[in-house]
Image (cartoon, helix red, strand yellow):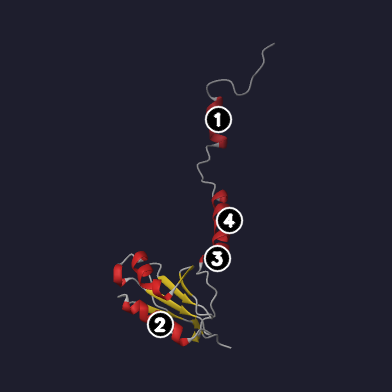
Amino acid sequence: MGGMIQRGVGRNSGRRRNRRSGLNADINVTPLVDVMLVLLIVFMVAAPLLSVGVPIELPKTDAKSLPSQTEPITISVDAQGQIFIQDTEITLDEIATRLIAISNNGYDERIYLRGDGQADYEAVMKVMARVNAAGFSNLGLVTDPVSAN
């Protein structure tokens, strides 16, 4: 009578415990959802910062946008007539050599020309003529859409 019964010791005790609690084979997706939401917020905040950095007041038109699979080369002319390729300021004489140096598809590279609405028309046309004279014919003019008020 002095014997003691111990729980969890014996052949069958492990089986009974596994049958009651069982192994949890479910995937816990809560940490994954948390990480994805943080990444979504980071990209939503960072996306506007990745646009072209030269501040230009583009003219407003009803033109439709062109489809593009790759990042185009962007040439900007600001209100003072300064010329930029992407974010780098250049002179009118440097346009052809810079375009040839940075184009990936040769003369078929898509080039976007952004001209400030207050820029001199002649300055924008000189840039356009230099791009065309350099042999690039896939040139698009960038505008802002007309806001419906």
Other-residue count near label 4 (Cα within 10 Å), few / some / many at <14 / 14–19 / ≥20: few
Give the amino acid type for the residue marked by disc 2 in the picture: Lys
Front of the two marks 3 and 2: 2
Q: Residue at x 67, y 15 (%)?
A: 4
Q: Residue at x 64, y 20 (%)?
A: 6
Q: Is residue 62 visible?
A: no
Q: Residue at x 39, y 79 (%)?
A: 140
- For the residues labelled 3 and 2, the Cα–Cα distance comes to 30 Å
Residue where numbered disc 1 is placed:
16
The quadrant where residue 17 appears? top right
Front of the two marks 4 and 3: 3
Front of the two marks 1 and 4: 4
Other-residue count near label 3 (Cα within 10 Å), few / some / many at <14 / 14–19 / ≥20: few
Residue at the top extreme of this rendering: 2
Q: Residue at x 54, y 51 (%)?
A: 32
Q: Is residue 13 visible?
A: yes
Residue where numbered disc 2 is placed:
126
Of the two numbered discs 2 and 1 on the same chain, state the one appearing first in sequence. 1
